[in-house]
Image (cartoon, rainbow, N blue to C red):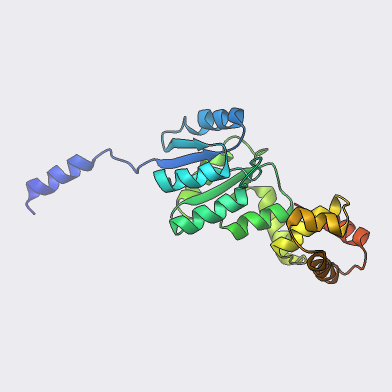
Amino acid sequence: MTRTESTDSAESTEGIGPAPVRLVLCDDHAVVRAGLRALLGSAPAIDVVGEADSGAEAVALAAKLVPDVILMDLQLGDGMDGDEATRRITADSGGSVHVLVLTTYDTDADITRAIEAGATGHLLKAERPDEPFTAVHSAAAGRTALSAPVAHRVMTGMRSPRPRLTERQRDILGQLARGPTNRDIARALFLSEATVKTHLGRIYDKLGVDTRAGAVAVAKEQRLLP
């Protein structure tokens, strides 16, 4: 390459910065999406390329637009929730689309389910307005982004490990906290009563209790309920 060619190449790329992060918003509340678009869309390094009001729509947009990051709420009304949408997006994209959870829910069960589904990070909606900017860029780079309260909970859980329940056991425990009978739980989760009883026995063993009330009390104390 001649000196002139080198100079021309340098001049042609001068002032060109990295491409903005392509972001999709997923929340079932239009007002929340509008606020996030106004907040994050004002940053020159973030380009909000789409919005979804359901988990199914988020999965479809991820496949169609292939964004860098999807900002995902967990509770999305009827249909596919944020955890399942995160799981499908992560699997379908081979991990190239990063999901950043932004939610009001911060129980251990919520955090665990989001991380197990493949979420790159977990933020709370009560965080400072500038927090999502840094988190979105971290997620786009594949780095874990956790709000301070969530990080504290994760570290506390690592120091004092809580009982690890399967997803089905967490579902049954959540039903149990509402007070229905085994038959009601079986109907709600499309299981047999015998299967519910088996799961309950394993839940009791893991929590170190022998009654339904004891299981619910320990679950609330250790924030295991969704």
Q: Nearer the viewer, residue 5 or 202?
A: 202
Q: Tell me the quarter of the image containing the N terminus.
A: bottom left
Q: Nearer the viewer, residue 158 or 33?
A: 33
Q: Can residue 45 be seen in the rendering of this structure?
A: yes
Q: Position of residue 26 (x, y in %)?
A: 55, 40
Where is 153 relative to 54, above or below? below
Q: Along the horizontal axis of the image, is 174 left or right of 55?
A: right
Q: Along the horizontal axis of the image, is 193 left or right of 54?
A: right
Q: Along the horizontal axis of the image, is 195 left or right of 215?
A: left
Q: Position of residue 171 (x, y in %)?
A: 75, 57
Q: Which of the 4 image quadrants contains residue 72?
A: top right
Q: Position of residue 202 (x, y in %)?
A: 81, 71
Q: Position of residue 12 (x, y in %)?
A: 19, 40
Q: How many marks?
A: 0
Q: Nearer the viewer, residue 192 or 160?
A: 192
Where is 67 relative to 192, above or below? above
Q: Residue at x 80, y 64 (%)?
A: 196
Q: Residue at x 49, y 59 (%)?
A: 91
Q: Can residue 223 be seen in the rendering of this structure?
A: no
Q: Along the horizontal axis of the image, is 143 left or right of 181?
A: left
Where is 93 relative to 47, above or below? below
